[in-house]
Image: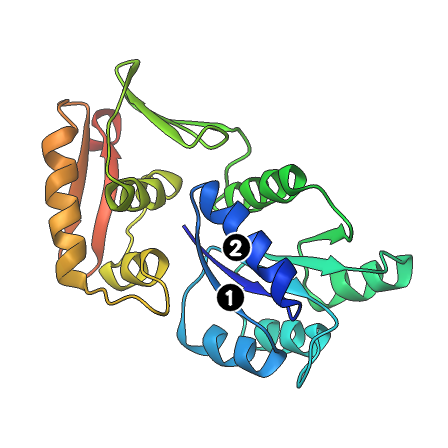
């Protein structure tokens, strides 16, 4: 899952990127509001972590423009204030959660996981898809109660499909959420990862279905009947 981090403090930005990447997320980082507004026009993210005190365009305006485009990506605001009026204003503009500085990295990771689950209509940490189960806390897949060994890219594709199980996910969405701004990726690469995943999902009760013109969908046997 790909996250956009908008933080103007280089040292803090680097430490947050490292922590989120170690937690299994792909992270793009920008350091001012105009850059954030630009990439949010052109890229699809699972979550935006947004500081308020930004140069060139503050976080309030970034959030306002984002919601003005009716983008539904969840937004976690980082604030050094944590004042009630900031929270009220943020909620009114469409923020989903707040984290006051200083904070523990473990809390940032937990809030990130929770926001992504809720954005996909999920409340529980464990996501069952027939014999396939995804634990959003440990970021581990099991198939028939056995660990499913995946490469990082395979894991990223299957994670997105599992979070949206039963719904079509376009190749372009998968490409955008897996490859960072500095990486080269294509829908053809996604086809390769899906092919590999199909070989590893050795069960008649779970499959990745190709929906022509729409993309892919993770489907369980009960849904097929």
Judging by the rendered image, the residue that carries numbered circle 2 is 17
Nearer the observer, 140 or 126: 140
Name of the residue lying farthest toward the right: 84
Name of the residue lying farthest toward the bottom: 56
Whether residue 31 is situated above or below residue 225 in the rendered picture: below
Q: Residue at x 51, y 50 (%)?
A: 18
The x, y position of residue 70, in whole percent, is 54, 71
Dot 1 surroundings within 10 Å: few (below 14), some, or many (20 or more)? many
Nearer the observer, 46 or 16: 16
Nearer the observer, 213 or 77: 77
Asked if residue 134 lies left or right of residue 150, the reply is right
The x, y position of residue 82, in whole percent, is 85, 56
Q: Quadrant of residue 185?
A: bottom left
Q: Quadrant of residue 52?
A: bottom right
Secondary structure of residue under mark 2: helix
Q: Residue at x 29, y 66 (%)?
A: 183
Residue 28 makes an appearance in the image: yes
The x, y position of residue 162, in whole percent, is 34, 38
Q: Residue at x 49, y 73 (%)?
A: 40
Q: Residue at x 27, y 60 (%)?
A: 175
Dot 2 surroundings within 10 Å: few (below 14), some, or many (20 or more)? many
Asked if residue 178 lies left or right of residue 105, the reply is left
Q: Disc number at residue 29?
A: 1
Nearer the observer, 223 or 11: 11
Earlier along the polypeptide chain: callout 1 or callout 2? 2
Disc 1 to disc 2, C-alpha distance = 7 Å
Q: Quadrant of residue 172?
A: bottom left
The x, y position of residue 99, in whole percent, is 73, 51
CB atoms of marks 1 and 2 within 8 Å = yes
Asked if residue 103 lies left or right of residue 71, the reply is right
């Amino acid at each position: 899952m790909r996250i956009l981090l908008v933080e103007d403090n280089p040292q803090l930005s680097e430490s947050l990127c490292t922590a989120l990447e170690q937690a299994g997320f792909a992270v793009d980082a920008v350091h001012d509001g105009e850059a954030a507004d630009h990439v949010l026009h052109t890229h699809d993210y699972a979550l935006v972590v947004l500081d308020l005190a930004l140069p060139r365009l503050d976080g309030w305006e970034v959030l306002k423009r984002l919601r003005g485009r009716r983008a539904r990506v969840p937004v976690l605001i980082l604030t050094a204030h944590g004042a009630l009026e900031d929270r009220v204003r943020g909620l009114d503009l469409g923020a989903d959660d707040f984290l006051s500085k200083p904070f523990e990295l473990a809390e940032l990771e937990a809030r990130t996981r929770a926001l992504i689950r809720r954005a996909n209509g999920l409340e529980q940490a464990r996501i069952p898809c027939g014999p396939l189960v995804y634990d959003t806390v440990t970021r581990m897949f099991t198939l028939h109660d056995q660990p499913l060994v995946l490469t990082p890219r395979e894991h990223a594709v299957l994670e997105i499909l599992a979070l949206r199980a039963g719904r079509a996910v376009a190749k372009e969405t998968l490409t955008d959420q897996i490859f960072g701004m500095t990486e080269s990726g294509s829908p053809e690469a996604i086809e390769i990862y899906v092919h590999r995943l199909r070989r590893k999902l050795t069960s008649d009760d779970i499959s990745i279905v190709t929906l022509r013109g729409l993309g892919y969908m993770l489907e369980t046997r009960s849904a097929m009947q």
